[in-house]
Amino acid sequence: MLKLLSRFNTIKNKILFSYVLLLIIPLSLVAMVNYIKSANILEEKAVEQFDTVSQLANQQFDQFFIDIDNLSKNIFQSSVVQRHLTQPFVPSNEYYRGEVEISAFLKRICDLKPDISSIVIYGSNNRNYYYHPKRRWNSSYDGTQEQWYQEAVAKDGAWVLSGPREDRQLYNKFDKRPEQVVTFSRVIKNLKTLDPIGVLAINVEIETLEHLTGVDTGENNLVILDKEGKPVVASEELSKWENRDELLQVSTVSPVTGWTSTYFADKTELVKKSKHIRNFMIGLTVLLLVMALFLANYISSGIVKPLSRLKLKMKDVEKGNFNSWQAVPVSQRDEVGELTQGFNHMVEQIEALVNEIQERERQKRETELSALQARINPHFMYNTLNGMRWMALMEGNQRLAELISSFVYLLKFSAKNQDNLITLEHETRLLKYYVDLMKMRHEPFEFRIRMGECMNDHKVVPFLLQPIVENAIFHGIAPLKRKGNIDVDLYVQDGMNVAVVRDDGVGMEQKQTESLLSDEQKDGHGEHFNKIGLKNVCDRLRLQFGSPASLDVTSKPGCGTEVRVIWPITVRK
């Protein structure tokens, strides 16, 4: 988890994540809203279409039965029908003549409206008339007992629409199946007395009504229901729609027939159409997201790559690698380019200042060293020469020659040496000459120097050990009332030169040791060989060898003093 968070902390990943987040949320919302709105629009359009289809079906049925109503009026107003239904029962020959006459009249009516399947007249005088081109009267069946007949009688002249039902009043000996019909019925009244004289039934086959709708429902279903909710016409079997999860239903009630036209549609089929829009929006969203990723990667790379190069160069500068530093190339003219250009200029100025400071410090130390080397203390020379004089008077031996030789060597080196570095072999020789001279002036003390093998050619700054030993003599050994010891150990440790100067003198307080490294050593009596103090030694070491070089003083009253010097190995070429 932390690894993932650390990756997110990069500028490039932040830009990529921001681009993706800023695009995927609005695009997803737009796609979702568009899909929902499209689905709603499709549903609204479907409802409008279904309502139009339902109204059209009702209008066709209404017009059809209005025409039937007009024909029914022509039938019961016909003089032929009125005459035969108002006459009392007559012999059969008269009845047959009336039957032929009315049948011919009813045939003409059917010719005017071919959609009519049959017309039946039930006379109150027990005279029944009908017309059907293919079927005959079933004398064994009494149609007056059916529900539609009773409803027509109850309406007393108003027309009644009944069905669907099986017409068993008419039959065909070759086709035993009764016709499935819808019956338009009404009471026929005497035009003079308005008394009921019969019942008229106009039958229309269900198949005719199915063709009458004339609407292509496609995968949907149009159902015509009567007043009781029973299906009259259906473009498909209703059982196919019973197990559908979601149905879109639009119903229209006819003011003429009282029937209800209901249009069914499966919502899942409507949603399929909107899925094309959804898939298009998903594809568009993915395409835009991929394009955004490429664009974000291109933009972020243009920002991050220069910053990465700048970061690497900053780390080099942080480590102080000015020698190998090269200016960061500027390839942009935006804020990143200005930042890079400013960094290059800043590093150039810092490098120039560092070089200038180093040069000034080098010149300063060389000047100070030259001045210090040239200014040998006259009191030291006087006291030394005076001691040599008294020794020569008292001893008259070779020792005097050795002391004079040591003194001359020190004078020559102090006056003529201009090198920044000398070998440890040379430095230890100077130290031995100096100690020989100091043993002449002070109480005897033991001096031992030990140097590791192969260290003769190791380089060191001039007068590194002499000021430290001088400090041990004046501040550690001289105040003693006994013979003192000074040990100098030179060795290599962890790839560095190490010099340790120990004395068993009086030691010093911590405050005094701190003062040795905080300022140049002072001596009001001018007893020192030169004025190179420990602070000067430390500064010259660090100026020459850098931060790896160090000088530490450890002391305690009554326990002596130890000075440890560490500097990098440099070998004479």
Image: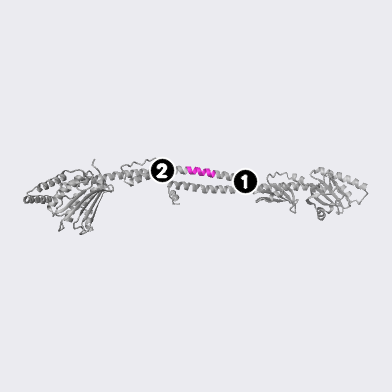
Q: Residue at x 60, y 47 (%)?
A: 38
Q: Nearer the viewer, residue 329 or 417?
A: 417
Residue 138 % position (x, y): 86, 48
Q: Is residue 306 magenta?
A: no
Residue underneath mark 2: 305
Q: Quadrant of the C terminus?
A: top left
What span is in magenta? 284-294
Mark 1 residue type: Lys
Q: SS at mark 1?
A: helix
User: What main secondary structure does the magenta stretch of the protein show?
Assistant: helix
* Quadrant of the rendered image containing residue 326: top left
Three-letter code for the amino acid on which mark 2 is drawn = Lys
Q: Position of residue 206 (x, y in %)?
A: 77, 47
Circle on res. 556: none
Q: Dots 1 and 2: beta carbons under 8 Å?
A: no
Badge 1 crowding class, 10 Å Cα cut-off, few under 14, some 14 to 19, many 20 or more, is: few
> Residue 20: in sight, yes or no?
yes
Q: Position of residue 458 (x, y in %)?
A: 23, 44
Mark closest to the chain's N terminus, 1 or 2: 1
Residue 293 within the magenta-colored segment of the rendering = yes
Q: Mark 1 — residue?
A: 272
Q: CA distance from mark 1 to mark 2?
A: 48 Å
Q: Residues within 10 Å of mark 2 (few under 14, many from 20)?
A: few
Q: Is any part of residue 522 visible from this angle?
A: no
The mark total stands at 2
Q: Residue 237: x and y, percent?
A: 72, 48
Asked if residue 519 lies left or right of residue 67, the reply is left
